[in-house]
Image (cartoon, grey):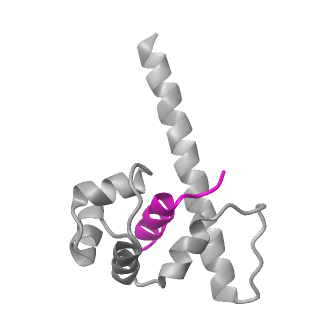
Amino acid sequence: MPLDIGRAIRIVRQAKRLKANDLARKADVSVAFLSLVEGGDRQPSLTVLRRIALALGVPPEVLILLSQPTNGTLRNSSPNGHKLTQAIRKLVEAEETLRDRLLKDGAREAE
């Protein structure tokens, strides 16, 4: 499943253990707007994307690259890059597992 820019922002934010309201404050955007971006309902302008990336402490290009679909293989000869790739992959898998569990629990409660 390809990432979108909002999901990439959320993954990096969570990896850095930042709360949404802290990131919003640092990036000078509203929490509501950040929530819409992370949820995929809004796309930030390049100016806002730069501010969010700066607040996250990463180059904007990282967020753009993370948002692009891949064939499932990432190659990086840097040990730090490999660790970051593994951490992001684990976050994506955990998010998908949690979403699946919540959907199953919601379906059971609706019965």
Instruction: Examine the rendered structure and indicate whether residue 14 appears above or below residue 111.
Output: below
Which sits in the foreground, 47 or 5? Answer: 47
Task: Tell me the residue at 63%/65% (across/down).
Answer: 68
Furthest-bottom residue in this view: 78
Counting from the top left corner in percent of width and height, residue 7 is at 49, 58
Q: Which region is colored magenta?
A: 1-16
- Residue at screen point 38% across, 78% down: 56
Residue 70: percent from the left, percent from the top?
72, 63
Between 83 and 51, the one lying in front of the other is 51
The magenta stretch spans residue 6: yes
Q: Position of residue 59 (x, y in %)?
A: 48, 85
Where residue 96 sits: x, y (%)? 57, 46
Most extreme residue toward the top is 111
Q: Quadrant of residue 32?
A: bottom left
Q: Is residue 51 above or below residue 93?
A: below
Q: Main secondary structure of the magenta part?
A: helix
Q: Residue at x 39, y 80 (%)?
A: 50
> What residue is rendered at 55% in x and 60% in y?
91
